[in-house]
Image (cartoon, grey):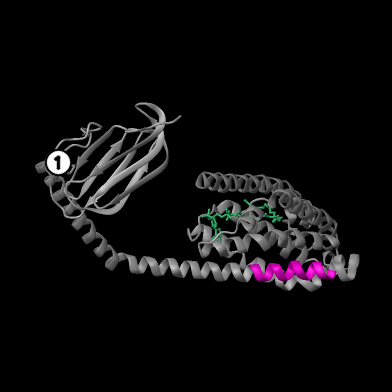
Amino acid sequence: MQQTLTPHVYWAQRHEDIYLRVELIDAQNLDISVHDNVLRFRAQGHGARGENDYEFSLPFLNAVKTEVSHRSTQRQVNITVRKQLSGWWDRLTLQEKKPLFLAPDFDRWMDESDAEMELREKVTRRKRFNKLKAERTVESRLPEDSFITLKKGFLFTYNLVQFLGFSWIFVNMTIRLIVLGQDSLYDTFYTISDVMFFCQILASVEVLNAMFGVVETAVVPAFIQVVGRNFILFIIFGSLDEMHNKAVVFFVFYLWSSIEMFRYPFYMLGCIDTEWKTITWLRYTIWIPLYPLGVLAEAVAVVQSISVFDQSRLFSIPLPKALGLGSSVSFSYVLYIYLPLMVIGLLINVRHLYKQRKKRFRTKKRKSN
Ligand SMILES: CCCCCCCCCCCCC[C@@H](O)CC(=O)SCCNC(=O)CCNC(=O)[C@H](O)C(C)(C)COP(=O)(O)OP(=O)(O)OC[C@H]1O[C@@H](n2cnc3c(N)ncnc32)[C@H](O)[C@@H]1OP(=O)(O)O
């Protein structure tokens, strides 16, 4: 049967506080209270007499406040009680004879004059801190705060516009696919391209944001993303009528908008210091299948456009007659160079997104521990 025992208790004081250290390992079920200037302690833990219930009560010499703060570590329980009036006590307990379980805490012990000096230093430090804080509030916090509000407002609006644009694209394409079936694959460009042009031109803002440090993102991945998509949209699809009715347009647009429907809401929530776990998970996960598929679809579009550029000679590069190699070089040669660049771009961005994912979920895990 368990018996109730008294733990070893060590004490020290300052002008305003009483510090108690209760020697109890792995203390559980703590019940600590102060009523009528008497502290009552009860807990289970491993003390001088092994694993047991331990308790004690201490009637204080003078009045104390009823709020008591305590912190339990693996080795001990630290208790702080506030004195009702600031001052130095001759002893801790009401009765003159010191209880047997109580001893001075020499690690924290101070005599009255040392404690006075500490108190004076504390007051000076607090005054200096308050003065600095007041100065900082007046001089710098106002412009800093309004800059942050302006930045968040701008980013929120930008992300909202992109979210609406890409959602419209995704929903429109999905409804058309359900209603028109396979036929909808071949007229995607005619129905969707205006909104896609708008969203992708606007997306150039993301490179500027990265360059000027408006958001904490790397410039190279943002640049690859924007340049890569705009190349496909404006050069491959936009400039060749022959590409407009190809099914590949559907796949490229659908893959692009699928990620953006989650990426922009994720950023929007970040602007208002909010997080929805599902959106975060989707933002940092669905790129895993979508990114390679997106690059594959873009590569198919590039390959399909090669013969069109060869025939139309659009964007062909004029050569000086002196070289004797013909009058111009087809733009398709640029595309042959672009294809391996896409693979390099894919690798750089997949690596970046993998790191961002690891960082995000590692931080989250640590925070939730
Ligand atoms: C040298 C010549 C180069 C020529 C290049 C040619 C190569 C062509 C390669 C082609 C590859 C492109 C293929 C691509 O088009 C295919 C597809 O898109 S398929 C569909 C799937 N795609 C994706 O999943 C990619 C989506 N895009 C992105 O994720 C970004 O664009 C990317 C830059 C790749 C990565 O984003 P970012 O670096 O910004 O990562 P984070 O989201 O983690 O953001 C970092 C922190 O910044 C905050 N942030 C960022 N933007 C905003 C914003 N607009 N508003 C508010 N906050 C923002 C974000 O919250 C993060 O902060 P914190 O960590 O504190 O949360």
Splitting the image into four quadrants, where does ligand 1 fall?
Answer: bottom right
Q: In what element is the residue under mark 1? A: loop
Magenta residue span: 163-176
- In the rendered image, residue 12, in percent from the top left (x then y), is placed at 20, 39
- In the rendered image, residue 245, in percent from the top left (x then y), is placed at 86, 67
Q: Quadrant of residue 48?
A: top left
In the foreground, 161 or 22: 22
Left or right relative to 144: residue 189: right
Left or right relative to 294: residue 154: left
Left or right relative to 228: residue 246: right
Q: Is residue 15 above or below residue 274?
A: above
Q: Residues within 10 Å of mark 1 (few under 14, many from 20)?
A: some
Ligand 1 within 8 Å of the CB at mark 1: no
**Residue visible at 52% across and 58% down?**
210
In the foreground, 274 or 119: 119
- In the rendered image, residue 191, in percent from the top left (x then y), is placed at 79, 73
Q: Is residue 313 visible?
A: no
Q: Quadrant of residue 75?
A: top left
Q: Is residue 8 visible?
A: yes
- In the rendered image, residue 283, in percent from the top left (x then y), is placed at 64, 55
**Residue visible at 37% across and 65% down?**
144
Residue lying at the far front in this picture: please name it.
1
Amino acid at the residue labelled 1: Arg
Say which residue label 1 marks.
Answer: 91
In the foreground, 364 or 54: 54
- Magenta residues, dominant SS class: helix
The reply to whether the magenta stretch includes residue 357 is no
